Amino acid sequence: MSDQTKDQAHGNPFWSPAVAQLQPYVPGEQPKTTARLIKLNTNESPYPPSPRAQAVLKEEGLASHLRLYPDPESTELRETIATQFDLSPEQVFVGNGSDEVLAHAFYSFFKRPQPLLFPDITYSFYPVYCQFYDITPQTLPLREDFSIAVEDYGVDNAGGVILPNPNAPTGRYLPLAEIEKLLQLHPERVVVIDEAYIDFGGESAVALIDRYPNLLVVHTLSKSHALAGLRLGYAMGQAHLIEALNRAKNSFNSYPIDGIAQKVATAAIADQAWLTDNCAKVIATREWTCMQLDDLGFDIVPSTANFILAKPPKLAAEDLFKALRERNIIVRYFNKPRISEYLRISIGTDEEMQALVAACREVL
Ligand SMILES: *Cc1c(COP(=O)(O)O)cnc(C)c1O
């Protein structure tokens, strides 16, 4: 918030005190025109979604369906997700992007007097939800190498735990055995594992759902499924957790998933072969990019995601960010403690990453 907007907020008689003091999340730049731009700043897929998902949008009569309200329970979509992960539909909740799923999870499980635990460097929406729902955050520092120190999470009287796996924006993966330790540290509290990037090389915690009544796993179609524009996310956990999310959802918006999104998402999730191929391409390009940047002297955090966190040699990260921007390449720079010397670079196509490496070589 600029100082000017802040002053207006405080002086605006129409705004509630609650909204005046919010500090909303600021998403990565979405330029109005992407012509000639290499966009490596918001971890979108460089490739289009599954042809089966695309075909749905060309179906005859699709638009005329919009006359009716969509299925409020997204039944077919939840059944498809359940089949994919060997769960029952009662163990699946869907939302308008995983951000919305997370918002309901914060309300359903973490809105209590005890503090919510998460890493000091993580998805920057978590503190925003804490403020929105009046939840006290308690951040725990990542180790020097940016890995998560699970032993630090044994805090007495915690209200819950949330972390992305792989973590964002570090890209570091936490093995399932460590996730199990977390679940055992807080058997009476919910542990949310935000697996937005799990398909790029990690092993999902979904397999633990049967054994842990306190585990909620959250996925999104925005990254590995190449459907950021569709806005579809989902949560998986035992039925009693899903019931809580439904209570929150049905007190907020009964129809969060439009009829078209339900159909497209169903087709996308059923196309597992496309997903495997798409992720394999991104992973191969990521490994190539890491080797090239390593040769140029970058310090790279090991990544299991579709982005890398890399510290440039010689030049400050912010200066390299600006130099790349002048060359029509956008990456993400976070002016925050511990990561202000790094750039977060999404993995694009091979050609885009070749252009990035060439630009870095020229600048450095
Ligand atoms: C991208 C991202 C999300 C949000 O995904 P949407 O489904 O697009 O809302 C959630 N968590 C993390 C860690 C992410 O990086």
Image (cartoon, rainbow, N blue to C red):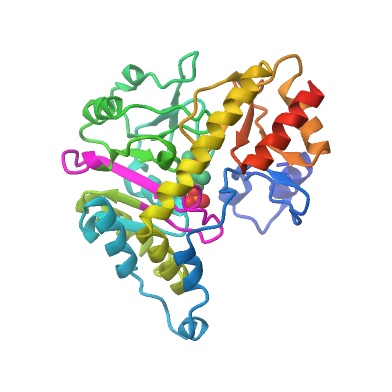
Q: Is residue 224 one of those drawn in magenta?
A: yes
Q: Position of residue 213 (x, y in %)?
A: 19, 42
| 58 w.r.t. 18: above or below | below
Q: Residue 113, percent across and down?
A: 35, 36
User: Is 204 included in the stretch rendered in magenta?
Assistant: no
Q: Is residue 17 left or right of residue 364?
A: left
Q: Which residues are magenta?
A: 207-234
- Compared with residue 170, is residue 267 higher up or lower down, i.e. above or below? below
Image height of 113 relative to 174, above or below: below
The C terminus lies in quadrant: top right
- Residue placed at 41% from the left, 52% from the top? 101
Q: In the rendering, at what x and y percent does residue 26 appear?
A: 63, 44
Q: Taking 284 as reference, is 311 left or right?
A: right
Name the outermost residue toward the right: 326
Task: Assign the magenta stretch its main secondary structure.
Answer: loop
Q: Is residue 88 left or right of residue 300?
A: left
Indicate the quadrant where residue 363 lies. Answer: top right
Q: Position of residue 301 (x, y in %)?
A: 53, 22
Q: Is the N terminus in the top left, top right, bottom left or bottom right quadrant?
A: top right
Does any portion of residue 280 appear in the rendered image?
Answer: yes
Q: Residue at x 51, y 36 (%)?
A: 284
